[in-house]
Each structure stands twice: as structure tokens, then as C-alpha cells.
Image (cartoon, grey):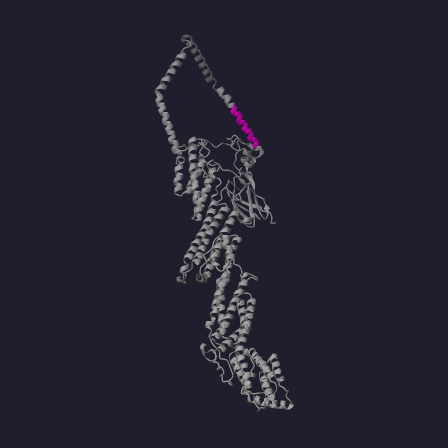
Amino acid sequence: MAPQPVVTGLSPKEGPPGTRVIIRGEFLGTRVQDLIGLKICGSDCLLSAEWKSPNKIIARTGPAKGKGDIIVTTQSGGMGTSTVQFRAYHETIGPLKESAVWIEESPSQNFAWGRRTLAQSGLTQEDPLGLSIEGNEQKIPEDLRDLFPEACGDLSQEHFSPSWFLLENHLATSFEDLKAGLSYLKRKVESQKEGQLSFLKSNAGSVIDQLDTLMNIRDKLQEDVKLHGNETLNVLETSIENSISESQKIFTDVLVRKEKADSTRSVLFALSRHKFLFCLPNSVDRRAKAGEYDIVVNDYSRAKNLFGKTEIPIFRKVLEEVDHRILSIRKQLHEKVVKMPQSVEQQKKLIKALISLELQQSGTPIGEKLRNIDPAWDAIEARAKYLEGTFRQTFEQHANKDSSAQEKVKSRDPSQAPSRVNFCEELCDIAASQLPDLWRLGQLYFTGELRGPHDPKPGDFKRMILNAIEKFCVYLRLAILIAADQRSLRQSSGLSWPIGSASATHQFLPWIPQCLRFTRIAYATLISLDLPSEALDIIQKLIDEVRLFCFSIIFKRATDRCKKLGSQESWELGVEEYPGATLLPAALETLLIETLDEVQSVCMQRETREGNLLEPQSDGQREVTQRLQELLSAFSGVIEELAFHSHDEETPTHNVSQLLGFPNAQQPDSVAGGGGGGAAAVTWEQRMLCCLANYAYCNKSFFARIGEIFVRYGYPLPTLAIETARYTVNQLFTNLLEEYVEHKGDPLVGTIEPSMYLGRFQWDHEMEIGQLRPYAHECCDNLVGVYSEIYSISPALLRPILESIVQTISEELARLMSCVQRFSFTGAIQAHVDIRLLRDSLEGYVNETAKNYFMEALEAINPPLSGEQKRKADEILERVKRNMRLQLLCFSVRDP
């Protein structure tokens, strides 16, 4: 837990309510949210507090009085302490004093306005102790009002305090001087008493004369009573009364008229003096119609301060009328506050006016009618509902437009953006412009600038923001993610974008990166608002989905382009690593690099607060693997189609026996790039060999290079996709190899038996020996032709192809030899020479199975060769090998 806050400095140290105070100290909070309490002289000042740093806070004092501590409370450190104090006091407000409120002009404030004399109101009093105050400038360090709260040092006031007077004027006077001053004061009082007695003594004659005069008056009165009696005064009284009565009759009319005139004059004076109040009902209506609500608030506040507590009936009646007008204006203001669209500043102005009017009318019967209305919250709700309504209206508008435009999709200009794209752009513009307004209005409400006496609703506002962002993302998902399963989304939202034709969908796909850019622009705007992470995560999830969808769409387009590579195949050999492979893999590599560049610039390059799509075991990594598998599978299919489709179109000429009267297939021309021939000169056999070479090259090194390209672009090594593609390539290679071997081997093997027994030849007859039989010569010649065809294209394919063909030949020879019942002396030697020549010349391409078949063929010679026959066979075999060294030489050139 952090240390407790400590207040060590204050500026200023005293002042009336509302004084701006700079508070300095230590541990005053780590951030704005950490400050949870501030009291100055016991008054709560948290609302006006402005946190600057852990050592500085600026605030305004509340309605306190007297000295008190400054207590700061933080969430991390708790309630703090103060080493300084602030003294709060209330200033006396007069007619010439600037004031923030209107002061009621009560009869007790009798200020003489107009002409006035310039006479001095009073004389400066001398010191009552008769002491000089010169050199007595020393002042008491404490405030005397704290020591004597109910007294003062003014001699003319009732609550005069001698102690205050002495501390204020004679703090430095010695005790002896004070005693002398007291003696002086006593003498002065005694002299005043002696002055009254001496006055009577000095004027004794005048007093006696006055008493004599009074005695004479009494005597004269008694004489008159004796002479005239007691009725004299009655007659005089009657005369006076008659005079009064007559005078009253004479001036009655004048007095009545005067009273009426005075009354009229008083009324006119009151009307003139309080013209502001009597004109206020019409004034507030006129100002309200003109939109000058700040003037309405000021005038109404002034009237309440001046006449709010008056008991005069006419004033009360006018105030009630004003209250009714203000109530009507509040209703109008509330209607304007919730009316959309309008700017935040306009709403802010209206809300402040409503709050001020509500505070002025609070506590009155009329004000209770609208007491439960919170204008700021109603404005927030209205703006949120308008935002959601705008989202839905825009969605329905563009969805209906897209539905009506489905029939015209064939004639649409490809450069013209589809309705989905226009919708995404407009929706993102709405979100980027209206969501910040909603957020700013909410912040003004929760910071207290627009909040009235009602409690805030942070939970409801958070749900409101989250709901608006979720709706925004739902609409974008419905419009953009056209290939995803949207059933649950449609059920939860009750919305659906019309399902367009395949052509319309195909036209929209290239525009998806543009929709992603619109969404990112709106997202960047919302990030700058400092929204809660929970809200931003909703949009981030959508953006990641759209990025992944863009990746999928771009790779699908690349897969479609890959499927068309077969039509661009020139059969040009250009791979040094694997002779026989064409430039088709290089075309795929170029296509893949272009695709990865596009993906990197469009969706894989992360922007602010976006996720990593390539995290282990994530949907992004699975999507990369799946799309690469599709691409490589499509490429494998292109090679397969080039091989088998050409086989269907072209009827190959089989190599058959020349002895039977059929010519061998013509020697194939060189493929393009090797012999200068064009694509039209490429035979089916050459295509098959090139396709086999392409498969073998892909399996050997090209697919590994594809993985290196992905790693170079920052992707994890797509091992699964590459191994799957290799497995597929191996399967296709095997199938294609079987097709080629069957095409080359079956006709070749099929000629052995007819050629062997041509001309009714029999092995049990004696024959001339010294060279090979024609069937063996033909096998060698046909194998040389196959060898040369393969070697001219891809020497690496010699072993897998020739091994299969040689195995088939050996099997056929073993079968034919086993069918012979008996060999003649020369027939056994001839068969032994033929089989051994074929076996020895093809030794480099004879596998274990073929060796066993050759051995079976030799063992099938019955009876077995004698020693003489073996010597004869060896001689003939050596001579035949010398004669056929040119044919046999090619079989000694091994595959690289």
C-alpha cells in the first residue's frame, strides 16, 4: 500500500468560498483515478479538484467558514494529513461589490442613491487612553477574529472588546503607560460628571426666572377661571374642532385625489423599478424561440435570487407565471435534446440550459413535475438509438439495392464497386463519425460537466457502447464474410444479406481488401478515443476475421490462377537442379511470391492493436496450411492434367516389332528449349517424361523451396502442407510412371514371343550359332530407343523406368524359357547367350526381382549346359559383345 497523502503547502491560505487553491504535498495520488476524496475546512471539494501530479492538486473551496485542515484521500494511500490550514470567511456584499449572484434589494439595505452631501460622516476618534500610537506598529501574529469570534475592537459597536482594542492598538505599550492611560480615562469621565453640576451652578439665575414665570402663568390662569369660569377651554376646543371639521370637508376631495395620485404614482414607480420581473414571462418566451437559452437561464436565475422569497402577492403571481413558462421551455428543450441528428456541441448547450433551469426550479411544486428527467442521459440514449437506427437503415438500404441489382450483374462495369463495398464504406464512415460523438457525450456526463442532481449510470453506458460496436461488427460480418457460415449470426441478429449469384459473389471478392481498409480506418479512429479494451477487442476480432478471409480469398485466386498454368506451359526445359523439369514450377514460384507480397501488404502486415494471425495452433496457421495445400494440390493436378489430358487427345504410336512388319515409333523431336522445336513438336512421351521430371523435382527440392519462401515472409514453416503435397506428388508420380512404363514396356514385351518363334523357329532344332537371335537384337534396340528418349529429357528417370521395363522383360523371358520342353545342343547355347547378353548389358537396371527372373530363365534351359557348351557360349557371348559394343555402350552411361 502506498504512503498516506501529506499536505505541506497552500496558496493562498485564506479566502471566501470559490477561491482557487493550489495544494502541494507528497503522495497526493499516482493518477487522476487514484484521487477519491478532498476536503477543505470540512467541505467536500472533490468535484472541483484537478489532479496535476503526485505533488500538486488545484481545487476551489466550498461553503465553509473558519480555519480547517486540507485532507486528501487516495485509493492507494487512504486518508492523509495536513501540516497547514486554510481560513475561510464570507465577504460582505454591497451595491458596489462585484458578485456572482444577484442580491435581493431588501428594505434593510437603505443606500442613499442620487445626490448626496460630501460632508464627512464622522470624525476620527482620538485614543481614549490619551496615549500616542506612533511607533506601535507591531501586530499580533494571530488573527483576532479567531480569539474573539463574537467581538470587535470598534468603540462604537455594541460588542466592543477592550482586549481586542489593546491587542490591536497597544501591543507594544508598556504596563506603566497603560496604567497612566487608565488614570487619564478616569479623570476624563469625572470631568464630564463635574461639568453637568457646574452648568447648573453657573445658570442658577436663569433657572429661578423660569420658575417665576411658571408661577405667574399659574396665577393668571386661576384669575381667568374666577372671572370666566371653566368653559373657556371648552369653547376654544369646540371652535378648534369645528375648524378641523370644516377644513376636512374642504380638503376631502383634494386628499382623495391626492391619495389616488399617490397610489397611481406608487404603482407606476413599482412597475418602472421592477420592469425586469413583469416583462420576464414574455422575455423568456421570446429568448427561447430565438434559441438564446443562456440568456433565459441568467434572467430566470436573477429573478429567483431577487424575488424567490418575496411575500408580495403580485410578485408571487408573476413568478408563478414565469415558472409555468420555464416548465414549458424545459419540455421544449428536452424534445430538442433527444431530437437527432444534431452536433454534440448543440446537445451540450441544450443540456446545460436544462440542468440550470432544473436546479432553479428544484423544490417548487412545478419543478417536481420534471424532477426525474435526466437530460444528459436521455441525450446519450437518443444518440445511441439514432446510431443503431442509422446502422440498420444503411444496411437495409444497401441490401435492397444489392437484391434489385442481381439481374443486372452481367452488365455491371467491373470497375464499379458493388453494393456491399459501398455499404462497408458508408457504415465505417458512420461509425467513425457518430461513435466518437456518443463517447464524448458520455465522458462529459460522467466527468460531471453535464450531470445534474441524478446519479450516473456507468454500467448502462458501457453496455450501450458495447452493443453499438457489436451491431457495427455484425453488419460488417454479414456484408463481408460471404463465404462463412452465417446461420447463427442471422438467427441472433434477425438480419441477412441477400444471397447473390455466383457471378455477383465473384465480382465482390476482389473488393474485400478495400472493405478491410475501410474497417481499419474506423478502428484507428475509435482507438484514439481511449475506449475500454473490451470494446476494442470486438472490432479487433472482426478485423482478424476479415484479414484471415482476405488471406483465404487471395490464395483462392492464386489457386485459380495456378489451375490455368497448364495452358501456359511452353515445355521449355530450364531447371539446372533437375534436368527434364520445365519452367512450370518457376511459374508457380513467381505466382506464389506475387501472392505473398499481396497478402503481406493487404492483410498480414499488422497495424495498431491487431492480433498475430500466425500464432501456433491458431485459425490463421491452419488457414495458411489449408490454402497452401490447396495451391500445391492444384499444381499437382495441373501436371497430371498435362500428362493424361494430352494422352487422351493424342493416340501414341507403340513400338512394335520390325520383324512383324510394323515400324518403330519415330524418334521424338527435342522439346522446346532443347532442340529448338515449339510446343506443337512435343510428343506425348516427351510430355510424360517432363511431367514425371516435374513431379520428381517438386518432391526433391521445389516444395522445400516453397517452405523457405514462406519462412522468408515471416510464416512458420508449413511442414504439414509440404509433406501432404509430397505424398500427393509421390502418388501421382507412381501412377504416371506406371502409365509410361505400361505404354513403353507392354508393346516391347509383347513383341518378344512373336519375334522369337517367327518363321516356325523351334529351340529343339539344331541351328547355326555365332550371334544373337533377332528377338534379342530387337529387345536391345527397343531398350536403346527408350533409353535415348529418357536420357534426352531427364536422365534421372532412367533407373525407375528401365528397372520396371527390364523386370517385365526378364519375367517374360523366364516364362517363355519355362515353356520350352527341350533344347537342342545348339539351341541351349543360343538361349544361354541371348539371356546372358540381355542380363549383362542391362546390369545397371536389374533389380533383385529381375535377377531372379533371369536366373529362372537360365535354369529353365533343359538339359543344362555341359562344360563344352559353356565354353562355346562364353566365346560367342564375348564376340557378340564386341560386335554390339556401340549399342551396349549407352547402357553403361548411368543416370546422374
Q: Nearer the viewer, residue 722 or 822?
A: 822
Residue 540: percent from left, percent from top: 51, 57
x%, y% of residue 705? 53, 71
Q: Position of residue 702 (x, y in %)?
A: 53, 72
Let me know if residue 138 appears in the view.
no
Relative to 202, residue 810 above or below: below
Tell me: residue 822, above or below residue 19: below
Q: Is residue 829 left or right of residue 457?
A: right
Of 636 and 896, nearer the camera is: 636
Residue 25 visible here: yes
In front: 117, or 611?
611
Q: Main secondary structure of the magenta part?
A: helix
- Image: 300 above or below 205: below
State the residue lying farthest toward the right. Answer: 867
Query: Residue 231 at x, y = what percent?
Result: 41, 10
Residue 603 shown left or right of residue 868 in the figure: left
Count of all numbered marks drawn on residues in the image = 0
Quick check: is 186 in the magenta stretch? Answer: yes
From the image, which quarter does the C terminus lie in? bottom right
The answer to whether residue 858 is magenta is no
With respect to residue 564, does 760 lie above or below? Answer: below
Region rendered in magenta: 178-193
